[in-house]
Amino acid sequence: MSDRATLSYDNTHIYDSYQIRSKEDMRTFLNNIREHCDPDLAVAVRSMKSLVCEWRSHNFFYYLHVFRSRTKDVDLERKQTWWRECFCRIVSFFYFW
């Protein structure tokens, strides 16, 4: 996992996250991380639905060629504002992979 993700208490950074497209593959990737990490890390405390929605919203913008240098990776932070979580849920709805 260390070559694809950096884990910390406040953040989980997944490199080249755009390469993983489907919800199922995202869940599998995140579950693999959760199995081998400290339960206090960022990836372990947020819900799977919230993590996947944020990841899908990043992918959506990446494939629209919006800020590709910033959306090719995803930062799954420990805490998300309510408005950002709503935004990610809405945007992820339009991501069809």
Image (cartoon, helix red, strand yellow):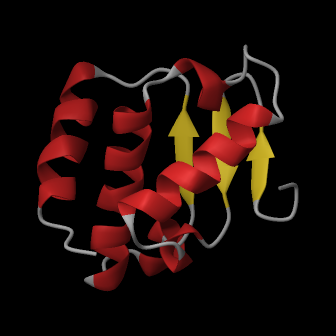
Q: Is residue 94 left or right of residue 40?
A: left
In the rendered image, the quadrant that contains the N terminus is bottom right
Pick whichever, 60 or 24, lies toward us: 24
Q: Toward which corner of the image does residue 94 lie, by quadrant?
A: bottom left
Q: Is residue 5 above or below residue 68?
A: above
Q: Residue at x 86, y 64 (%)?
A: 3
Pick whichever, 55 or 73, lies toward us: 55
Q: Residue at x 75, y 54 (%)?
A: 5
Q: Is residue 9 left or right of residue 78?
A: right
Pick whichever, 44 or 32, lies toward us: 32
Q: Toward which corner of the image does residue 85 lie, by quadrant?
A: top left
Q: Is residue 56 left or right of residue 32?
A: left
Q: Position of residue 64 (x, y in %)?
A: 25, 83
Q: Is residue 3 above or below residue 67?
A: above
Q: Is residue 30 left or right of residue 87?
A: right
Q: Position of residue 65 (x, y in %)?
A: 32, 85
Q: Residue at x 21, y 56 (%)?
A: 92
Q: Residue at x 62, y 32 (%)?
A: 43
In the rendered image, the quadrant that contains the C terminus is bottom left
